Image (tube, rainbow, N blue to C red):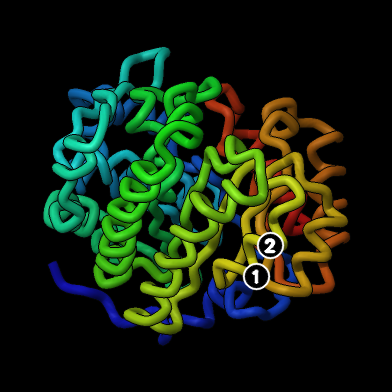
């Protein structure tokens, strides 16, 4: 596996220009879950894999999936096809994906389970991901950026403690109240694992990385949000900045509500992704601090039509005064017609 040149040499790419604080018009666009189940070419390829994790761990297949939306829509960035749960999986926790149920994990039960976790296993256990990144980088043109990613410690911990996604994570909520020190230790281990993984992704080919704290909204007090979302992510951002200076880190604390500004100021992220519950006015205020990304409701793209076009134009116009990456507030809904994604891109670019 041969690393590609350092990302600092590729700042002509629109996405990287924006992440470095420049205004670009029209703004670059990529979508969370842009490679996946809504694309017929993905569904055809997916039939050839034994399961979802097997698909992620097949560099030939994962790189092809990553590239599918780039070919179809001309996105300004490819985000590598993988999953946030590769971190616990590489540390020996059982992770499987059941049709219609999403991820299912063996539940983490206490001190002994946390003590057994070894963050140094995460990079060696994810060498297929590094090969995928290299393959994708070799196939991209000189205007399309490559994004790596990882789950934030609290979100990973939530899956590991409750053993599944969605819902209200009752076991995780109980741990925040009954054994917060154990949750601290778990998040510390996961912070080290995620830091190592993101640095390795950058060394492989990633030109920017995004940290997904998908369940940060469960943390319903300022104290808990600071303790289990901001503090672990700050340590990761500091590590990436120290070891791979110049590579932008995007943070996404989904459901943060009125805490987005605090998150930006306290973590040191280079850009902020927001969800669809976040107003354009809030995004515009955040834009004075860092580049902003997100906000379009995935349900609007699912529905398509004039409402979609009008929303795209409104977002572009409102945020046109500063650095802005066009994206959704969450991932592409699997029932979305690909034609609606094409409509979004055309509306954004004024085609």
Looking at the image, residue 136 lies above or below residue 18: above
Looking at the image, residue 205 lies above or below residue 327: below
Q: Which residue is mark 2?
A: 262
Q: Is residue 238 left or right of residue 189?
A: right
Residue 97 showing in the rendered view: yes
Please name the residue shown 38% across and 73% down the image.
240
Please name the residue shown 40% across and 36% down the image.
179
Q: Is residue 324 left or right of residue 72?
A: right
Please name the residue shown 28% across and 24% down the image.
107
- Point out the residue furthest to the bottom here: 9
Spot occupied by residue 192 in the image (x, y as percentages of width and height) = 29, 60
Front residue (pair 195, 107): 107
What is the spatial separation of the Cα atoms under label 2 and label 1, in whole angstroms? 5 Å
Spot occupied by residue 63 in the image (x, y as percentages of width and height) = 29, 49
Q: Quarter-wise, where is residue 132 in the image? A: bottom left
| Image quarter in which the N terminus is found | bottom left
Please name the residue shown 13% across and 53% down the image.
121
Q: Is residue 36 left or right of residue 91?
A: right
- Secondary structure of residue under mark 1: helix
Q: Is residue 152 left or right of residue 44?
A: right
Residue 67 showing in the rendered view: no
| Mark 1 Cα shell of 10 Å, populated few (<14), some (14-19), many (≥20) | few
* In contact (CB < 8 Å): disc 2 and disc 1: yes
Q: Which residue is mark 1?
A: 265
| Image quarter in which the C terminus is found | bottom right
Looking at the image, residue 316 lies above or below residue 54: below
């Amino acid at each position: 596996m041969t690393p590609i040149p350092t990302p600092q040499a590729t700042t002509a790419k629109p996405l990287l220009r924006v992440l470095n604080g420049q205004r670009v018009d029209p703004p670059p666009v990529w979508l969370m879950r842009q490679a996946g189940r809504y694309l017929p070419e993905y569904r055809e390829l997916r039939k050839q894999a034994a399961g979802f994790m097997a698909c992620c761990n097949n560099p030939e297949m994962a790189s092809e999936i990553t590239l599918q939306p780039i070919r179809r829509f001309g996105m300004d960035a490819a985000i590598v096809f993988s999953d946030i749960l590769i971190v616990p999986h590489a540390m020996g926790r059982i992770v499987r994906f059941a049709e219609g149920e999403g991820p299912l994990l063996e539940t983490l039960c206490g001190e002994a389970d946390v003590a057994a976790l070894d963050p140094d296993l995460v990079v060696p256990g994810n060498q297929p991901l590094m090969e995928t990144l290299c393959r994708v980088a070799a196939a991209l043109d000189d205007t399309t950026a490559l994004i790596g990613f990882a789950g934030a410690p609290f979100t990973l911990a939530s899956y590991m403690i409750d053993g599944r996604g969605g819902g209200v994570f009752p076991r995780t909520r109980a741990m925040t109240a009954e054994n917060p020190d154990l949750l601290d230790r778990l998040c510390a281990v996961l912070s080290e694992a995620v830091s190592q993984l993101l640095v390795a992704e950058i060394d492989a080919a990633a030109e920017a990385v995004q940290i997904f704290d998908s369940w940060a909204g469960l943390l319903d007090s300022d104290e808990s949000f600071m303790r289990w979302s901001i503090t672990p992510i700050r340590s990761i951002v500091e590590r990436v900045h120290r070891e791979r200076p110049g590579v932008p880190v995007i943070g996404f604390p989904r459901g943060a509500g009125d805490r987005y500004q605090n998150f930006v100021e306290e973590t040191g992220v280079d850009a902020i992704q927001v969800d669809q519950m976040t107003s354009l006015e809030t995004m515009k205020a955040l834009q004075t601090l860092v580049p902003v990304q997100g906000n379009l409701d995935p349900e609007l793209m699912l529905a398509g039509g004039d409402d979609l076009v009008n929303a795209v134009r409104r977002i572009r116009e409102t945020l046109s005064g500063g650095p802005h990456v066009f994206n959704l507030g969450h991932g592409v809904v699997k029932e979305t017609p690909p034609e609606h994604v094409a409509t979004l891109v055309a509306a954004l670019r004024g085609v």
